[in-house]
Image (tube, rainbow, N blue to C red):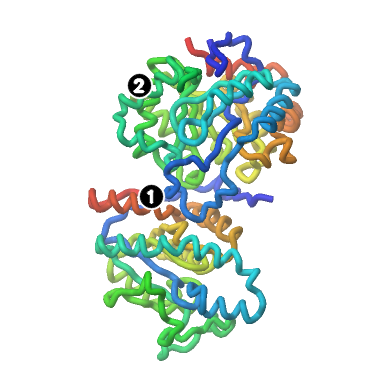
């Protein structure tokens, strides 16, 4: 049975985003080792030990599909001097695990190996990495402050757990008056069905989704014209 | 005159017509795959490519009272007029093929290099002179959007279609929603398409606004009809967009408001699982489930005839 989205029948349209280099931030969310190391990461080790790998087939399949797209977008953003930031579920050594982290057990120490990113999308020195106490990047007020200080009006999001963290971040950004665009094939859900459902549901008037191919064409226009309307 | 893949027919010979269907297509041929995104699963792509099964499906349609179908697969993802001609002969139904182009991922790369005028010449020839060696002719033009606005290569196609429409008189049928429907005011870019077409001098009565039942807004639909356009409920049976019950109520409401001469209905069948051989209702869904809903609401046989016979014949007529 296909899921229906009747809210779309009565709401207004998603407002366009007007991207410039200055008002835009590329956010890489939850793309650190626990989620994305498919060989020896926290998640893969956990599900293997508990004989639950089949339940996560979709997750690792989607990760493999989107993996090449992340460095492609990142490389273009860096070349264009678009601001890049990272947000990672976990806590620094000088922070306590949050209530969410205690409840779920996802209380990773980001100062250790669990805070590492794959070689393809390692943060540069000037790119901030924010700890994330809950699903939303904005659960860390320092990230909200960073966006405000830099007059960021649009956030392009790539990341793991589209149906949990990425979705929550985009909704919270909207609450902060900041528009967001998810790179639909550089973000991935926990399951195929979750990915499809969230991609449909999250766009109800709030968030835009574009593929990597589409986004790169739009960034090319931005580079040529100084801004691009999406 | 209406131009089918087997040659011209008189308007009165068209019969009951489904104006937006696929008969032979394969989305895997889409040349700009990257635009669709790497998480799209090809197993869910639109694809119909088994002659015997499709022919049997068309025979079911014929037996149920069907006379004609507009096959809206365009150049770029498996359009095959010779195959359509064989199917038309095998099932004894009229098939009208489509010139123009589908959404951005399915537009061949040569379109990038053509000017609007060159593109207009190219698609005009598909209607006036025919396609390929067999020179079978298309009978309608198509324009589509993948983005939330008509822009880029899709705008070029619409501008070319406008020129070709004025040269040939053939109608324009459009794809107006898709994955971007939540981003478009009123749920359809038909309004934007109409604006572009009118600026290009196209008569709005030659414009069929498709897919209006993916995210319908009755105020937008009546304003389009007031301009003279056809408004086409053409994803009937796809209830993840809208319940058929709601579609029937909307069609009924539009008839009550005086718009019966602007309405057309179809299914947009394009996958095996939607067909009778796939366990669904195929091209007979409207006969088997939707018309009974309309009748129950009080829609008359004359009004159904207008929607399924008179209006398609008028829309597809090339003077």
Residue that badge 2 annotates: B121
Callout 2: chain: B
Q: Secondary structure at mark 1?
A: loop
**B89 sits left or right of A27 in the view:** right
From this viewpoint, is residue B49 visible? yes
Residue A175 image point, x, y percent: 44, 64
Residue A106 sits above or below residue A21 on the image: below
Residue closer to the observer: B156 or B129: B129
Residue A108 sits above or below residue B60 on the image: below
Mark 1 and mark 2: span between their CA atoms? 34 Å
* Residue B100, image quadrant: top left
Q: Residue drawn 57% across and 83% down?
A: A105
Q: Nearer the viewer, mark 1 or mark 2?
A: 2
**B136 sits left or right of B88 in the view:** left
From this viewpoint, is residue B257 visible? no
Do the residues at discs 1 and 2 belong to one chain? no
Packing grade of label 1 (10 A; few <14, some 14-19, many >=20) is some
Residue B202 image point, x, y percent: 39, 20
Residue that badge 1 annotates: A16
Residue closer to the observer: A149 or B10: B10
Residue B77 image point, x, y percent: 50, 36
Q: Could you tell me if the residues under marks 1 and 2 are in contact, i.e. CB atoms within 8 Å?
A: no
Callout 1: chain: A
């Amino acid at each position: 049975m296909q899921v229906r989205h009747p809210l779309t029948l009565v709401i207004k349209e998603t407002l366009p985003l007007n991207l410039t280099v200055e008002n835009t931030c590329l956010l890489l969310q939850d793309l650190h080792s626990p989620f994305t190391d498919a060989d020896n990461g926290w998640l893969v080790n956990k599900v293997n030990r508990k004989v639950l790998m089949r339940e996560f087939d979709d997750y690792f399949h989607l990760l493999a599909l989107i993996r090449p797209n992340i460095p492609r977008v990142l490389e273009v953003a860096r070349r264009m001097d678009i601001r890049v930031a990272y947000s990672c579920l976990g806590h620094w050594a000088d922070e306590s695990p949050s209530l969410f982290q205690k409840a779920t057990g996802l209380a990773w120490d980001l100062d250790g190996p669990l805070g590492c990113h794959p070689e393809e999308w390692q943060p540069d020195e000037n790119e901030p990495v924010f700890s994330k106490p809950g699903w939303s990047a904005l659960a860390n007020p320092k990230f909200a402050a960073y966006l405000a200080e830099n007059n960021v009006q649009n956030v392009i999001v790539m990341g793991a757990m589209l149906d949990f963290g990425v979705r929550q971040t985009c909704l919270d950004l909207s609450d902060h008056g900041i528009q967001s665009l998810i790179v639909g094939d550089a973000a991935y859900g926990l399951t195929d069905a979750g990915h499809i459902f969230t991609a449909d549901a999250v766009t109800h008037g709030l968030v835009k989704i574009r593929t990597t191919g589409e986004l790169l064409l739009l960034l090319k226009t931005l580079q040529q014209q100084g801004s691009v309307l999406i | 005159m209406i131009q089918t893949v087997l040659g011209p027919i008189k308007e009165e010979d068209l019969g009951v017509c489904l104006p937006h269907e696929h008969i032979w297509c394969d989305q895997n041929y889409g040349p700009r795959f990257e635009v669709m995104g790497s998480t799209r699963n090809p197993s869910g792509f639109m694809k119909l490519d088994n002659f015997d099964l499709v022919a049997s499906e068309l025979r079911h349609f014929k037996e149920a009272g069907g006379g004609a179908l507009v096959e809206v697969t365009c150049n770029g993802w498996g359009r095959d007029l010779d195959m359509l001609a064989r199917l038309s002969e095998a099932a004894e139904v009229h098939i009208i093929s489509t010139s123009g182009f589908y959404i951005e991922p399915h537009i061949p790369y040569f379109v990038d290099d053509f000017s609007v005028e060159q593109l207009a010449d190219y698609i005009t020839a598909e209607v006036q002179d025919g396609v390929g060696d067999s020179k079978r002719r298309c009978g309608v033009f198509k324009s589509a959007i993948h983005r939330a606005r008509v822009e880029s290569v899709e705008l070029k196609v619409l501008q070319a279609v406008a020129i070709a429409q004025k040269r040939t008189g053939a109608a324009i049928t459009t794809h107006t929603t898709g994955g971007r429907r939540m981003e478009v005011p009123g749920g359809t870019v038909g309004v934007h398409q109409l604006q572009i077409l009118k600026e290009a001098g196209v008569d709005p009565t030659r414009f069929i606004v498709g897919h209006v039942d993916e995210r319908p807004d009755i105020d937008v639909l009546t304003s389009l009809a007031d301009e003279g356009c056809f408004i086409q409920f053409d994803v009937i049976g796809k209830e993840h967009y809208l319940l058929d019950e709601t579609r029937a109520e909307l069609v009924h409401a539009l008839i009550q408001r005086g718009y019966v001469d602007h309405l057309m209905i179809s299914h947009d069948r394009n996958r095996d699982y939607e067909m009778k051989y796939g366990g669904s209702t195929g091209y007979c869904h409207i006969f088997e489930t939707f018309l009974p809903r309309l009748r129950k609401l009080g829609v008359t046989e004359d009004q159904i005839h207008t929607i399924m016979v008179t209006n398609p014949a008028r829309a597809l007529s090339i003077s």
